[in-house]
Image (spheres, grey):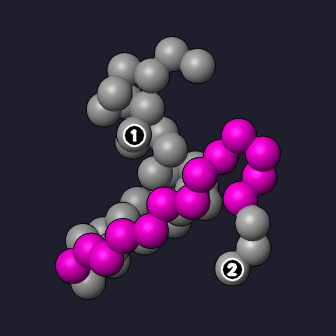
Amino acid sequence: MGKSPEGYKRLSADVPEDLYKEFSRRCIDQGVKKREYLEKILKKEFNWKN
């Protein structure tokens, strides 16, 4: 794996296969990359204003 871009940290997690498949399906449905969708979810959860 490559180095994270400046100002970013790498996130890695093991999740249940069914949850991962649903996550992937939603990314496809919305036409976004997994990283973009996960960032959107996290920002919404933490009310991130950046």
Q: Nearer the viewer, residue 45 or 5?
A: 5
Magenta: main secondary structure equals loop
Q: Quadrant of residue 10?
A: bottom right
Say which quarter of the image contains residue 33: bottom right
Disc on res. 42: 1
Measured from the top left, where is residue 47 in percent x and y?
Answer: 37, 20
Q: Position of residue 21 (x, y in %)?
A: 33, 77
Taking the image as drawn, is residue 31 in sight?
no
Seen in the image, is 41 located left or right of residue 18?
right
- Please report the residue visible at 26 percent of the width from the left and 83 percent of the height from the top: 17
* Residue type for callout 1: Leu
Q: Residue at x 59, y 52 (%)?
A: 9
Q: Which residue is mark 2?
A: 1
The magenta region covers: 4-16
- Few, some or many residues within 10 Å of mark 2 (<14, 14–19, 20+): few
Instruction: Kindly tell me whether residue 15 is visible in this rendering.
Output: yes
- Identity of the residue furthest to the top in this view: 49
Q: Considering the image in quadrants, where does the N terminus appear?
A: bottom right
Q: Position of residue 3 (x, y in %)?
A: 75, 66
Judged from the image, the secondary structure of the residue bearing numbered disc 1 is helix
Q: Quadrant of the C terminus?
A: top right
